[in-house]
Image (cartoon, coloured by chain):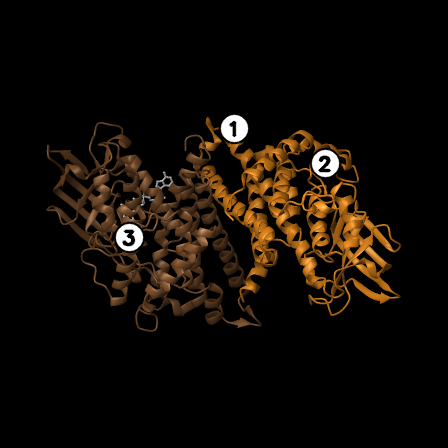
Amino acid sequence: MPLVLTDEQEMMRDSARGFLAEHAPIAHFRKIRDSRDPLCFSRDLWKTMAEMGFAGVLVPEAFGGVGLGYVEAGIILEEAGRTLTPSPMLSTALVAVTVLARFASEAQKTALLPGIAKGERIVALAVDEGAKHKPEGIALSAKRAGNGFRLDGRKGFVLDGAAADTLIVAARTAGAPGEISGITLFLVDAKAKGVTAEQTIMVDNRNAARFTFEGVEVDGGAVIGEVDGGWAALEAGLNAGRAGAAAELVGAGGEVFERTVAYVRERKQFGKLIGEFQGLQHRLAHLYTEMEIARATSLKALQMLDEKPDAAGPYVALAKAKTGEIARLASQEGVQMHGGMGMTDDLDFGIFMKKIRVTQEIFGDANFHTDRIARLRGY
Amino acid sequence: MADLETFRAEAGAWLNANCPPEMRVPFDGEDAITWGGRNWVFRSEAEKVWLERMAAKGWTVPEWPREYGGASLSRDEAKVLREEMGKRKCRSPVESFGIWMLGPALLKYGSHEQKLEHLPKIARGEIRWCQGYSEPGAGSDLASLQTKAEDKGDHYLVNGQKIWTSYADKADWIFCLVRTNKDAPKHEGISFLLFDMASAGVTTAPITLISGASPFCQTFFSDVKVPKGNLVGQLDKGWDIAKYLLTHERDMIGGGSGGMFASRPLGQIAAQYAGQDGGVLEDGMLRAKIAQLELDAWAFSLAVDRGRDLAKAGQGLGAYSSVLKYYGAEVNKRALELVMDSMGSDALEWEGKRSKEGKTARDWLRTKANSIEGGTNEVQLNIIAKRILALPGA
Ligand SMILES: Cc1cc2nc3c(=O)[nH]c(=O)nc-3n(C[C@H](O)[C@H](O)[C@H](O)COP(=O)(O)OP(=O)(O)OC[C@H]3O[C@@H](n4cnc5c(N)ncnc54)[C@H](O)[C@@H]3O)c2cc1C
């Protein structure tokens, strides 16, 4: 597959860009943030995004979606990264849909996917338990009880957790933390008895939550796939989320970069445009180069998820590591090259910096993914 | 697609039958390359046979038209051929400045006669070319070059000096930038000339590099007579050709046809010399740096692919070669720094058999030129700032 968008994909990008510019520019984000709306996104907007086919982009047509691929999902997220559009796209439309569409039973799919595609149901993945991503370290326990299971433990950094109707909880049914076997995925109603949510609004005003599970009872029908064999489904969901986050980082980083280039072309000091200073020119040219390299990794990861999902893991790791690192560089250079203006909340650069900081942490930062590649290569 | 798979099968079968086993070991550095030329001494019968067979197929320059010694392959077919050669570890049968740089420029700017005369000889590895661009006073500011060619009726008379001319002492012909109009603005009085290095008045003096090798020379021209037919393109209009050729040079340096000099994965080298414990390198700091470099190198190779795909889709940027040249040079330099870090004092031995006469250290020193040759990294950043980012005053 050539590393360029097809004509249809280009068209999709244009329409996503047009839609977000009209319905969800950064002013939309500011309005939600400044009104301290606890949802942190707009349900109305999400419904409209669903009508555009965004929420159901990966949902098979048989379940009410549009049945497109990860490249298309990535295009939407990249554009949303440019406009900082808050929505449950990553948590629900990528991560949850990937887990459900590929690993859930027909009954589970029928119960959940159509609502997701309509923008009505929000489904969040509960995986992390500590401050750093470490999926094989899952300790939250699920013990057999009656004809079902009993869940006890904690989760944190659950994206859109405070808005979720349903949680996909990664729990340990066998083995010890550190082992990838013995993990099982459960569907849990966010309002079930014993589930307590504490909303943790993040630095980028993202909806997230910590959860406590105390004697939460679920029946056997709540298990996604095989008991003890949930790792593959978890990885697939995480990889979808990582690749989606990478695309979002490319969008956010690209936007900061373009705005910064525009600024150095108009701001004057010492009687010159600051863009005339070679000290800045070279840093921008370097950043451009890094952005191009990062962009190639992100597109490749998305294409791999579409074409060879089982071999996509290392490509996704590469993309998440590179885009995280480079979007951070872009956000830092963006603030620095705007001087005092860059530090103000009036300009958007700080908002991009916060968004990028959180997105690069999601499902493993650059260190995590770089370490993964080193292990895969045997050192 | 089906055609491509048929081609793949045929190419694979042909390579199996025709590539001698001795030619199926990876290059270990520039020394092993077959450069060709009038004075080339083949190091083995296999090397000679391999070149002859590939040249007869047109596969030394697969994308060039058949009439000029190529095989008229499409970009996709050429990629398949590279992949099939890669799978079998087939060595490139011949590499040269003619293939990398002059060929593409002649294909675009040369006359039919010039193409017929020069391209097939390049394809067959018969004539080796060198590049006469840089002068003592004209490096990054190449357009300030002073070597001049005067119109003497039936020939040009060339006088002046070039420097850093790689392999000038081994090359048969030179493609040379000369000033033909000293009154015009500096970019508008330059012409692109071809001439035989055996012409009267051409002399070369090798320069020793920090690696100890002497691949490049000072080149002097004193009243060298060059036939008029050896002018490529129009008089005084050589700068466009010169720049076009440079993008191919950059693609070659950045695009990894020279590739990584590290002959084995860095993680393996570090494991052998610096130690490994439970599948993880003992030196955690070194491990992190190697992993980061490997990610960057991998990401870079994807960007190279993407650059090709963009060009093919008609979305290419002329200055993309600067992006790849800049990044590729940095990656390669970092790779060899890390080889040195990994191998410690073993890599510092300069003489003797154990170190193959200091091969690692020499390779390391060689990479330092990556960010200088073909236009320095600072110059690449200037080009990106100007041509892609359109920054003021760049
Ligand atoms: C191994 C090797 C092989 C080569 N082979 C050939 C060959 O075959 N044929 C040929 O013609 N040439 C060849 N060259 C020459 C090469 O192209 C030049 O060395 C190069 O273009 C730089 O020119 P210079 O050496 O004069 O350095 P200078 O131009 O003097 O540069 C010195 C320093 O100043 C910096 N600098 C210069 N201008 C600017 C600016 N505007 N902004 C910021 N920084 C600037 C440079 O980046 C560099 O760091 C070769 C060089 C090497 C190292």
Q: Amino acid at mark 1?
A: Arg
Chain under numbered label 2: A
Residue A183 place in picture, x, y as percent: 73, 64
Q: Amino acid at mark 2?
A: Glu
> Which disc is residue B96 wearing?
3
Residue under the point 45% across and 55% down: B5
Residue A102 place in picture, x, y as percent: 69, 55
Q: Amino acid at mark 3?
A: Ser
Q: Quadrant of the C terminus of chain B?
A: top left
**How would you rate the neighbour count of disc 3 (Cα within 10 Å): few for under 14, some for 14-19, many for 20 or more?**
many
Q: Which chain is brown?
A: B
For chain A, the rendered hue is: orange
Residue under the point 39% across and 67% down: B347
Label 1 belongs to which residue?
A267
Q: Nearer the viewer, mark 2 or mark 3?
A: 2
Is B192 displayed left or right of B315 in the figure? left
- Label 2 to label 3: alpha-carbon separation: 58 Å
Q: Quadrant of ligand 1?
A: top left
Chain under numbered label 3: B
Instruction: Report if the CB atoms under discs 2 and 1 are less than 8 Å apart.
Output: no
Q: Looking at the image, is mark 2 or mark 1 earlier in the sequence?
A: 2
**How would you rate the neighbour count of disc 2 (Cα within 10 Å): few for under 14, some for 14-19, many for 20 or more?**
some
Observer-nearest residue: B188 or A131? Answer: B188
- Label 2 to label 1: alpha-carbon separation: 42 Å
Is A357 displayed left or right of B65 in the figure? right
Label 2 belongs to which residue?
A51
